[in-house]
Image: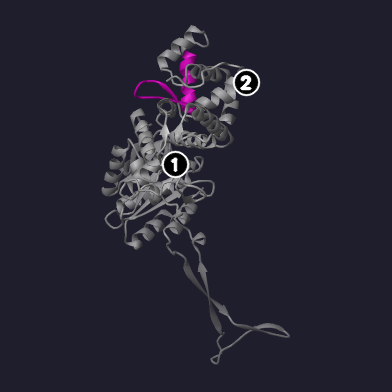
């Protein structure tokens, strides 16, 4: 018997795993094979159950608390792949209020287009009827003449046409008025906010004004904005508008602890009825550097490799090696292409510093890297500090962990990418297969 695939087949609403036979996934239907992993490991989509969200209890509580307090709008920020969207969606997974999510991208460049997308998602009919009077005429051999009524006045008829959303000017006050007229609380998640053009002040100023208007009239309209984007601060993401500082509340999402990554893998094993060898789990935990995206991507590739190998429900080191290669190759063709272009513009000192970080296993302490650079006479201390800062702030290749002062790549896949696609092949550098964190 086959069952339509839904998340309910994989993880029940109460967070409990379902009973067989709803345990497999094949060709779009659940089967008797224990491979429902595609609903557990989801690198291309937010997680679908709070049961699979580990280490974010405090941040969920922060979002929910802020949304209860009048006039405040959460701004969730952090590095790409750290789990921002999953966090926000799970914070409202049981909300009785209307929740919508808008992804900023190439089609959303202005406040107008953003507003149009919001209103369409809310299924709000904001089109208006425009009525115009048209004089009646008739055509004769001498041309067209006005038609007169019995009292000698020109006859006219009314022409009515509908003005759609895209033909209306949608400014912050108009949007507030529409939200107010809905007479219900709505949470509007504006995701990937960093995709909006930085060079244009228009969308950011208008969003700041909408925030301010909603805050000023919170007793009349409870609708909230939740901004989500890649940034180090709310000011960096939204700009320096006075209303932002008053109404926006920053929630910075740090990478997960190693314990949280391991807890996810243990929970995943119990759901999908597969086993990761202990050394494989350790490498995934270390390699992820706390980024859920990497965890989901490598986990999914591992299981795919095991299936191709026709394995016996156990993910081995052989599967992990294949998974790393496949993940890097896919990333190289897609999102990591931007890093390939970025590396083409690196200066010699930046390349040399990145090479040393890679040679040290991808996660050295700042002090150990400084000692190594000085011992090898690669650059002086002033050049080291300047180059390290540029790789953080301008290039955004790395960041410094506040917990242990170690250097980490902003995208966990950057380590194998730089090692295998750039340095190893181009410079013939012999490196260990796995990072030694």
Q: Is residue 345 visible?
A: no
Range of the magenta residues? Answer: 382-408
**SS under mark 2:** helix
Determine whether, in the image, residue 4 is placed left or right of residue 154. Answer: left
Across and down, in percent, residue 107 comes to 53, 49
Q: Which residue is mark 1?
A: 37
Q: Earlier in the sequence, mark 1 or mark 2?
A: 1
Across and down, in percent, residue 234 comes to 38, 38
Q: Nearer the viewer, residue 112 or 302?
A: 302
Across and down, in percent, residue 260 comes to 34, 32
Give me the disc on residue 302: none
Frontmost of labels 1 and 2 is 1
Across and down, in percent, residue 186 comes to 35, 55
Structural crowding at the residue carrying mark 2, measured as other residues with C-alpha within 10 Å and reported as few (<14), some (14–19) or many (≥20): few
Count of numbered circles in the view: 2
**SS under mark 1:** helix
Magenta stretch contains residue 386? yes
Mark-to-mark CA distance, 1 and 2: 37 Å
Q: Nearer the viewer, residue 366 or 270?
A: 270
Q: Do callouts 1 and 2 mark residues in contact (Cβ within 8 Å)?
A: no
Q: Is residue 310 visible?
A: yes
Magenta stretch contains residue 4? no
Determine whether, in the image, residue 343 is placed left or right of residue 53. Answer: right
Q: Nearer the viewer, residue 388 or 420?
A: 420
Q: Residue at x 29, y 39 (%)?
A: 57
Structural crowding at the residue carrying mark 1, measured as other residues with C-alpha within 10 Å and reported as few (<14), some (14–19) or many (≥20): many
Establish if 239 lies above or below 369: below
Q: In the rendered image, which quarter contains the C terminus?
A: top left
Q: Which residue is mark 2?
A: 426
Q: Nearer the viewer, residue 178 or 304?
A: 304
**Going by the picture, which residue comes out furthest to the right?**
141
């Amino acid at each position: 018997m086959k069952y339509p695939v839904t998340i309910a087949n994989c993880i029940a609403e109460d967070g409990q795993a379902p009973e067989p036979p709803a345990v497999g996934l094949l060709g779009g239907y659940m089967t008797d094979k224990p491979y429902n992993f595609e609903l557990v490991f989801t690198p291309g989509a937010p997680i679908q159950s709070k049961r699979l969200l580990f280490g974010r209890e405090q941040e969920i509580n922060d979002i929910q608390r802020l949304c209860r307090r009048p006039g405040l709008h959460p701004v969730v920020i952090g590095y790409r792949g750290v789990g921002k969207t999953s966090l926000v969606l799970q914070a409202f997974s049981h909300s009785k209020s209307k929740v919508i999510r808008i992804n900023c991208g190439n089609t959303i460049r202005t406040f107008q287009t953003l507003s149009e997308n919001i209103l369409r998602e809310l299924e709000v009919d904001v089109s208006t009827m425009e009525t115009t009077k048209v004089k009646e005429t008739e055509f004769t051999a001498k041309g067209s003449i006005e038609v007169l009524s019995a009292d000698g006045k020109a006859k006219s008829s009314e022409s009515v046409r509908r003005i759609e959303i895209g033909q209306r000017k949608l400014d912050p006050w108009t949007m507030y008025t529409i939200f107010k007229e809905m007479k219900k609380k709505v949470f509007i998640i504006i995701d990937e906010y960093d995709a909006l053009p930085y060079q244009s002040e228009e969308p950011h100023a208008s969003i700041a004004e909408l925030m301010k208007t909603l805050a000023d009239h919170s007793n009349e309209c409870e609708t909230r904005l939740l901004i989500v984007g890649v940034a180090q601060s709310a000011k960096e993401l939204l700009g320096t508008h006075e209303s932002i500082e008053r109404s926006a509340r920053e929630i910075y999402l740090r990478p997960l602890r190693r314990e949280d990554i391991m807890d996810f893998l243990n929970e995943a094993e119990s759901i999908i009825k597969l086993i990761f060898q202990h050394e494989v789990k350790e490498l995934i935990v270390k390699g992820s550097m706390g980024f859920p995206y990497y965890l989901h991507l490598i986990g999914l590739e591992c299981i795919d490799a095991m299936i191709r190998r026709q394995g016996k429900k156990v993910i081995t080191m052989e599967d992990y090696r294949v998974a790393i290669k496949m993940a890097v190759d896919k990333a190289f063709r897609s999102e990591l292409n931007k890093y390939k272009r970025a590396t083409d513009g690196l200066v010699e000192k930046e390349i040399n510093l990145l090479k040393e970080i890679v040679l040290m296993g991808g996660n050295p302490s700042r002090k150990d890297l400084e000692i190594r650079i000085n011992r090898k006479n690669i650059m002086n201390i002033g050049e080291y500090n300047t180059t390290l800062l540029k790789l953080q702030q301008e290039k955004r290749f790395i960041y410094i962990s506040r917990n242990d002062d170690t250097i980490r790549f902003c995208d966990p896949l950057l380590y194998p990418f730089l090692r295998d696609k750039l340095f190893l092949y181009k410079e013939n550098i012999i490196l260990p297969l796995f990072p030694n964190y």
